[in-house]
Amino acid sequence: MTGIQQLEPLHSMARRNADQAARDLGQALARKEQLDRQMAELVRYRADYREELRCAMSESLRIDQAHAYRNLLERLDAAIERQQALLDTQVRACDQARHQYFDRHARLQALDQLIQARRKAERARQAVREQHLLDDLTQSRWRLAKSVS
């Protein structure tokens, strides 16, 4: 088994790992986008309810309505805090997935370069062997031609 053939299983494994890291990064980024959309929606709801409360306060607002608005706004603030914590965790997961992707991709590139260098060296050795064979053949023909004459 040649050195290149010995590297093929490692190369296949490195390719699978790099592909999996790319999928993991894609999933992490998709999850982050989803959390971003949910956060924007919560912030928009909070702004809408604050505006609604402001309009209601300019008119006659009963105390029970004011408490209901305040309660709803407090729940939205708590939901936004929870969402921010989820988002922060997902940002760290994205950073980790990105780091792993770049690491695995770099390993794959290193193996590609090693295999390419070994192939080049093998071609050079083969060319030298062929040149030696041609030289031997030429010398033997030359000797044969010299001995016949």
Image: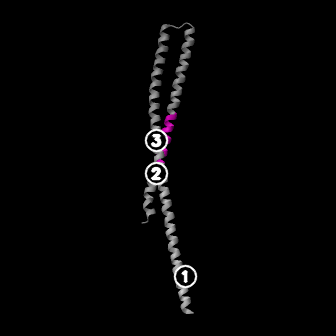
Magenta-drawn stretch contains 130: no
At which x and y percent is residue 65?
Answer: 50, 11
The three-letter code of the residue at mark 2 reads Arg
The three-letter code of the residue at mark 1 reads Thr
| N-terminal-most mark, 3 or 1 | 3
Magenta-drawn stretch contains 28: yes
The stretch of residues the image draws in magenta is 17-33
Report the residue marked by disc 2: 107
At x 56%, y 15%, the residue is 52
Nearer the observer, disc 1 or disc 2?
Answer: 1
Q: Secondary structure at mark 2?
A: helix
- Give the Cα distance between marks 1 and 2: 46 Å
Graded by Cα atoms within 10 Å as few (under 14), some (14 to 19) or many (20 or more), the crowding at tag 3 reads: many
At x 51%, y 77%, the residue is 133
Of residue 130 and residue 85, the one placed in the foreground of this image is: 130
**Mark number, residue 29:** none
Q: Is residue 148 above or below residue 126?
A: below
Nearer the observer, disc 3 or disc 1?
Answer: 1
Of residue 132 and residue 41, the one placed in the foreground of this image is: 132
The three-letter code of the residue at mark 3 reads Ala
Report the residue marked by disc 1: 138
At which x and y percent is residue 1?
Answer: 42, 66
